[in-house]
Amino acid sequence: VDPWLRENTDNQGIRILELPAPRAVDLPVPIADFGRLAVAWGLSYAPSEIGEIFLPSAIEDVPPPPRRDDGDRFISKDQV
């Protein structure tokens, strides 16, 4: 995905960031891969506490904003 993002968007591609362990967590052994612990923590929640997940096809499209009539703000060459 990184080469595609660099070529087709205005960003610098993908940045991989390490998730640091919070200082307030009292761990018996230092964990080198804290991201795995964070995922395990998230998976420990009951489904009723996470919220409802909808497929993109089940979500209605956002209607476009109403068009503004700029006819009275138009300045023709005759007015200049």
Image (cartoon, rainbow, N blue to C red):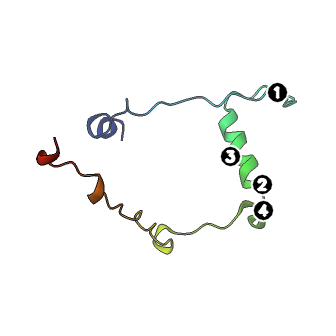
- The mark closer to the camera, 1 or 2, is 2
Disc 2 to disc 3, C-alpha distance? 9 Å
Q: Position of residue 36 (x, y in %)?
A: 67, 40
> Please, what secondary structure does the residue beneath circle 1 have?
loop
Quadrant of image for the N terminus: top left
Earlier in the chain: of badge 2 and badge 3, it is: 3
Q: CA distance from mark 2 to mark 4?
A: 10 Å
| Picture residue at 33% right of the left edge, 38% below the top | 5
Residue neighbourhood size for the residue with mark 2, other residues' Cα within 10 Å, grouped as few (<14), some (14–19), many (≥20):
few
Q: Would residue 15 be found to the left or right of residue 67 on screen? A: right
Assign a secondary structure to mark 3: helix
> Can you identify the residue that label 2 sits on?
44
Callout 2 amino acid: Ser
Between disc 1 and disc 4, whose residue precedes?
1
- Give the number of the disc on residue 49: 4
Mark 3 — residue? 39
- Name the residue that disc number 1 marks: 29
Task: Return the disc, 1 or 2, that comes first in the chain's sequence.
Answer: 1
Q: CA distance from mark 1 to mark 4?
A: 29 Å
How packed mark 1 is, by other alpha carbons closer than 10 Å (few <14, some 14-19, many 20 or more), is few
Instruction: Kindly report which numbered mark, 2 or 4, lies closer to the viewer in this rendering.
Output: 4
Residue 58, above or below 7: below
28 horizontally vs 53: left or right: right
Give x and y (percent) for residue 74: 24, 52
